[in-house]
Amino acid sequence: MSKSKRSTEEKAATRSRKGVGGRPPKYDPERTPVQAEKLCRQFGADDQALAEYFEVDVSTISRWKNEHPEFKAALKRGKDDFDTERVEKALVHRAIGYSHPEDDIRVVNGEIVITPTVRHYPPDTAAAIFWLKNRQRDRWRDKVEHDHGVQPDNPIVSLLEGIAGSTLKPKQGDD
């Protein structure tokens, strides 16, 4: 064998002993899904925020979701929990109104005075409408169904039938 071929084979053997070359992966199957789920659950992190946290590109987050089902499932759990625990509850509070304790801090005669109070927020009509339209679609949707069928006991129908010389029937759908 030639010396150049042997050195190439030796290099290949050395690489196979060390593992794949290049930078070590940032995805850790034990830690990455757990961290991502916490970020989504606590802060509502989206793909961009996750990419910044893990110091990768957004396309890498997309690739991880495709290549690691446990990562994708962790993101779904975290985002669902955030939506339910934080956003949905906040919307309900806005829709029905709410109160919370608050301290009123003022300076009176050169001294700081803290007075415990309760702050009230009235119901928000827009939040209530949004909630009802999404929770009770049949009762609160904007779309109203209209019946445009011909009513047989309508006097106008009788007049038109007399003119046409035949019975008018409701138009059938395009079945």
Image (cartoon, rainbow, N blue to C red):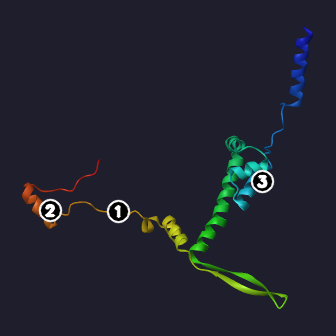
The tag earlier along the polypeptide, 2 or 1, is: 1
Q: Which residue is mark 2?
A: 157
Q: Position of residue 86 (x, y in %)?
A: 66, 66
Does residue 10 appear left or right of residue 129 in this picture? Answer: right
Which residue corresponds to the image point at 60% horizontal and 69% vertical from the top-left? 91
> Alpha carbon of mark 2 to alpha carbon of mark 1: how far?
22 Å
Q: Residues within 10 Å of mark 1 (few under 14, many from 20)?
A: few
The tag earlier along the polypeptide, 1 or 3, is: 3
Which residue corresponds to the image point at 9% horizontal and 55% vertical from the top-left? 164
Quarter of the rendering occupied by the N terminus? top right
- Which picture quadrant has residue 127? bottom right
Q: Position of residue 163 (x, y in %)?
A: 7, 57
Q: Element under label 3?
A: helix
Q: Position of residue 55 (x, y in %)?
A: 79, 46
Q: Which residue is mark 1?
A: 145
Q: At label 2, which amino acid type do we have?
A: Val
Which residue corresponds to the image point at 75% horizontal and 57% vertical from the top-left? 38
Does residue 156 appear left or right of residue 65 in this picture? Answer: left
Q: Mark 2 and 1 residues: CB-CB less than 8 Å, in contact?
A: no
Q: Residues within 10 Å of mark 3 (few under 14, many from 20)?
A: some
> Alpha carbon of mark 1 to alpha carbon of mark 3: how far?
48 Å
Q: Nearer the viewer, mark 1 or mark 3?
A: 1
Q: At label 3, which amino acid type do we have?
A: Gln
- Which picture quadrant has residue 15? top right
Q: In the depicted view, which residue is nearer to us: 33 or 4?
A: 4
Q: Which residue is mark 3?
A: 35
Does residue 90 appear left or right of residue 172 in this picture? Answer: right
Q: In the depicted view, which residue is nearer to us: 106 or 141?
A: 106
Q: At label 1, which amino acid type do we have?
A: Glu
The tag earlier along the polypeptide, 3 or 2, is: 3
Image vertical order of residue 80 relative to residue 69, above or below: below
Q: In the depicted view, which residue is nearer to us: 175 or 25?
A: 25
